[in-house]
Image: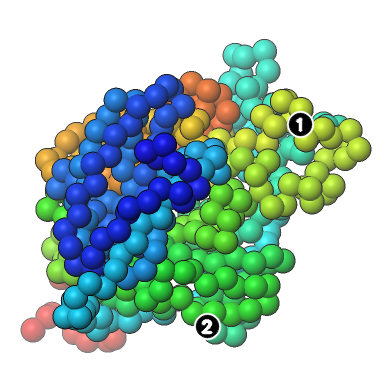
Amino acid sequence: INGYMYGNQPGLEMCKGSVVSWHLMGLGSEVDVHGIYFSENTFMTKGTRRDTANLFPHTFLTAIMKPDSEGVFEVSCLTTDHYTGGMKQNYEVKQCHWWNVDLSMYLHEKTYYIAAVEVEWEYSPNRTWEFERHQYHEESPGNPFLNKEDKFIGSKYRKVVYREYTDQTFRTPKNRAEEEQHLEIQGPLLMSNIGDKIRIVFKNLASRPYSIHAHGVKTDSSVVAVTNPGETKTYVWKIPERSGSERGDPPCIPWVYHSTVDIIKDTYSGLIGTLVVCRSHYLPSFHTKKKVQFSLLFMVFDENESWYLDENIKTYSANPNLVDKEDEEFLESNKMHAINGKVFGNLHGLTMHVGDTVSWYLLGMGNEIDIHTAHFHGHSFDYKQTGVYRADVFDLFPGTFQTVEMTPENPGTWLLHCHVTDHIHAGMETTYTVLPKEEKLSLLPRLFHLFKCNGTAGTLE
């Protein structure tokens, strides 16, 4: 960044409460796909609220920020190779004026009990759909990723995930409702409004240190505390005005949350989820259409970067002694092109009815290869970026979070996939199902039935 690496760039200092213009420029070659992330603060660009700006060769963007937290924060590229290669600096926000204090009121408090849990993860529990879809190939393009041979791991891996519990004892996992089944590897979908204070009681049930931190929120410290194995800590996220939609955004916008002990390895190991922030006045009405929401993470999980790689080789490889961790075929076999951690049609639960109002929260994270074009067969959607636009494909890059809204009209089972050819062949595809419109009984027949059951005369007064 400006010719400096690993936090060596001087001069990125500002006052809390000042209006700061960041003029961002991208140059270079095809690897210069950047997601420039400003930790702990958000900015406005083109009428929308973001904390990450996507840059490509010869693109330019101005981000307007009004920092409201004091401390030293990171500005970095979320593209994983770029982050580990040194594309990260620090910017400092100082308390220059004694009167510049946060007077925001956070009157509504929500508490979630979330643990980091180690699990056996199966990317492809059923290969029937895969083989049927690719029956005209000599062999399925999924074989290099999913076949378990002497020098490969296969489709099962040890991973760590965020899971919600019922209370502070962390004895009873909270069962996921039917509408949450599609989240799969993601942690719980956390819903909030501007003005909320979110308390995350976090227990580390895993074997190494982890944490939990969300994009877009305000915290009281620039340092995210580390939770060691067996420990329980409380993380507080405040949702100020600058965490929510701007005039060019839809009513609800998504952010990701993840562990920050080692952002790259923790995320590839499985610790990631979605936080949705809605405008404070955004309340569903009984007179509106039924609202359905799904969160989809398009990301190539690079198991070579997981904390559990050696354990996975030992546990799941047919012959661990034959595994060469530097072999190109082995490295490629561990790159799982997944939607919510599932490949080749194994992501289920994306079900809705004709006429529903459906919000899709689309998330992109990962490396230079994580250029995804999320394509919905059978329907178009609207997305808002200052204006309202219609499409059936949305572009995702590392650090892209976007709401798209759909009103399905065509019953059936439709393909949903990344349209990048290599990603299709590697399994980044699933289906969503639109059922016929739900029949709603009128109020009078239901009341009449209720009275008859109670032995009342068959007339209503």
Residue 31 shown left or right of residue 440 in the figure: right
- Furthest residue toward front: 10
Q: Give the numbered dot on residue 167.
A: 2
Q: Is residue 260 visible?
A: yes
Q: Nearer the viewer, mark 2 or mark 1?
A: 1
Task: Tell me whether the residue at label 2 lies in contact with that at label 1, contact meaning CB atoms closer than 8 angstroms.
Answer: no
Q: Is residue 394 above or below residue 47?
A: above
The one of 3 and 390 positioned closer to us in this rendering:
3
Q: Is residue 278 visible?
A: no
Report the amino acid beneath label 2. Answer: Asp
Q: Give the numbered dot on residue 326.
A: 1
Crowding at mark 2 (Cα within 10 Å: few <14, some 14-19, many 20+):
some
Crowding at mark 1 (Cα within 10 Å: few <14, some 14-19, many 20+):
few
Indicate the quadrant where residue 189 lies. bottom left
Q: Position of residue 198 (x, y in %)?
A: 37, 75
**Element type where label 2 sits in the image:** loop
